[in-house]
Image: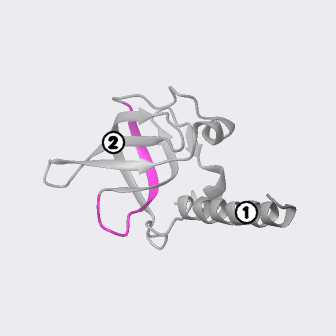
């Protein structure tokens, strides 16, 4: 393979990886014009790569519950923000702030949460949005 062909091939591969990375980190599915704050009970905290998840149940006015899935950052980034794998456990009562999915499905993008002991855990990249 000639040097020019190798450079062209590597340039093409780099461009493809960059497009893939941008697509992966798009926030287009979340409605960042609507910030929701809900009170709920944690069902599961998935400490997984590439994104962690908080699954919780929120009570509706009629007494029934809805299941919500909130996407968080990676464990590595959450650790730097003060999270641990056991920071949120099934049964914990939380107040959680997030941007909802545009589709109307019960999900969203994590901004912050407050535990019953008053500890606030916030996504550092969205700290300026964590105010009520």
Q: Is residue 94 magenta?
A: yes
For mark 1, what is the residue?
9
Rendered position, 43 above or below 111: above
Q: Quadrant of residue 11?
A: bottom right
Q: Which mark is residue 56?
A: 2
Q: Residue at x 64, y 37 (%)?
A: 76
Query: What is the residue that sits farthest to the right in this orientation?
Result: 3
Q: Residue at x 36, y 41 (%)?
A: 55
How dense is the environment of label 1, judged by Cα within 10 Å: few (below 14), some, or many (20 and up)? Answer: few
How many marks can you see? 2
Give the SS element for disc 1.
helix
Q: Position of residue 79 (x, y in %)?
A: 64, 35
Closer to the camera in the image, 57 or 107: 107
What range is drawn magenta here?
A: 92-105
Q: Which mark is residue 124?
A: none
Please report whichever mark, 2 or 1, sits nearer to the chain's N-terminal start. Answer: 1
Q: Position of residue 65 (x, y in %)?
A: 20, 46
How dense is the environment of label 2, judged by Cα within 10 Å: few (below 14), some, or many (20 and up)? Answer: many
Q: Position of residue 128 (x, y in %)?
A: 64, 61
Closer to the camera in the image, 43 or 48: 48
Q: Residue at x 42, y 34 (%)?
A: 45
Q: Residue at x 86, y 61 (%)?
A: 3
Closer to the camera in the image, 124 or 62: 124
Q: How is the image coloured?
A: one colour
Q: Position of residue 29 (x, y in %)?
A: 43, 67
Q: Is residue 41 left or right of residue 8?
A: left
Q: CA distance from mark 2 to mark 1?
A: 46 Å
Rendered position, 83 above or below 123: above
Q: Disc 2 or disc 1, which is closer to the eye? A: 1
Rendered position, 12 above or below 113: below
Q: Quadrant of residue 50?
A: top right
């Amino acid at each position: 393979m000639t040097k020019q062909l190798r450079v062209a091939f590597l340039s093409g591969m780099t461009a493809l990886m960059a497009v893939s990375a941008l697509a992966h980190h798009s926030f287009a599915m979340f409605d960042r014009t609507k910030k929701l704050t809900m009170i709920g009970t944690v069902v599961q905290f998935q400490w997984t790569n590439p994104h962690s998840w908080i699954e919780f149940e929120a009570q509706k006015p009629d007494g029934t519950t809805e299941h919500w899935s909130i996407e968080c950052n990676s464990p590595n980034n959450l650790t730097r923000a003060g999270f641990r794998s056991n920071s949120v456990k099934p049964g914990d009562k939380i107040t959680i702030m997030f941007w909802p999915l545009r589709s109307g499905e019960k999900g969203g993008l994590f901004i912050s949460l407050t535990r019953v002991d008053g500890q606030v855990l916030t996504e550092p990249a969205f700290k300026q949005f964590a105010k009520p």
